[in-house]
Image (spheres, rainbow, N blue to C red):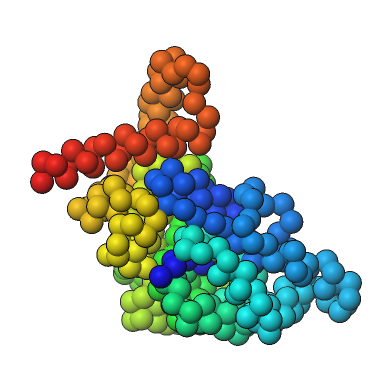
Amino acid sequence: MPFAQLVIGPPGSGKSTYCYGMLQFLSAIGRKASVINLDPANDATNYEPALDIRDYIRLEDIMAAEGLGPNGGIMYAMEELENHWDEFLDRIKALGRDYLIIDCPGQVELFTHHASLRAIFLKMQKQDYRMVVMNLIDSYYITSPSQYISVLLLALRSMLQLDLPHINVLSKIDLLGSYGKLDFNLDFYTEVHDLGHLVPLLERESPFLAGKYARLNEAIADMIADFGLVAFEVLAVEDKQSMISLLTVIDKATGYLFGSTEIGGDTVWAEATRQGGYLGGITDIQERWIDHKDAYDAEERRQREARAQEAAPTLSPEDEWEEEVRQWEAQQGQKLSRG
């Protein structure tokens, strides 16, 4: 059965960059993948889509023909896609058993209350596609208590609306250290525990609004905690270990990890992740990207320079990905053989 990542998130959260990075990474581990652009406004993707909705319907044409603004035009486009989905699905099926990465529009209405995107995903599910929703949220928003509460509500609403396996991801984690000091360690924000600790921070951030809406803030925090659904993974898309860690979580969510290793040709990857794969945790991420980012960056630069001096010719970025994955596979193979 085919597998798919459905990449959603607000504008600026890094969806297209993620799609390109994941496509490169999957290619490096031997998994045949294709990206589908489902955003009729995205006319400058940094990847080459195997299937592009703009070949059939474009936002600017809708706006001109229907007299709609950008948001209305996007929703109209999704409704048109839903109405003609069978035709578009035939194009998807023509990609065979490729692992799909679907780049979705960024308007939050589409994954919080508008029905078309949900209907499209459920139609794919009925065609035996094993899917996971990747909800990308810029890690900048955890630096502000009020914005963090907002993205928690957005994530919870998206999970309830789309009703599919769902992974919330704090993207651009490599930039988090430059945003300022966090009020808590990173695990507070990823595990979403004890949100009552945010209430006094909301009062500090905006005494007037926090005082006026203190009971509402407490009720929202309690509601999110009571559902117990929202948690976050983290992502630095150019960091190999970060991608390894995230793909391990994705493969568990879709069931890819538990299927045949011949599905995508990435036998070493599947076997290694069954044995545990990359075991870096949130503490390692805090140390790498927040507490000691400059020291880690300097050491990685030193290692890259050393490799560059030894390499002839110099490796391209894609080849560097493949080389690091090969080294990781070799390490995992040694672990497996010792096991």
Q: Residue at x 47, y 83 (%)?
A: 126
For the view shown, which residue lies furthest in the top direction? 309
Question: Is 164 placed above or below 147 here?
Answer: below
Q: Residue furthest left?
A: 339
Residue 3 picture location, percent across and down: 44, 66
Residue 94, by quadrant, is bottom right
45 lies left or right of 113: right
Q: Is residue 260 left or right of residue 223?
A: left
Residue 177 vertical position relative to residue 97 in the rendered view, above or below: above
Does residue 6 show up?
A: yes
Q: Do we see residue 197 in this rendering?
A: no
Give the percent coordinates (x, y) of residue 54: 74, 64
Asked if residue 165 lies left or right of residue 87, the reply is left
- Answer with the quarter of the image where residue 230 lies: bottom left
Quarter of the image for residue 64 reads bottom right
* Quadrant housing the N terminus: bottom left
Residue ID at (48%, 42%): 238
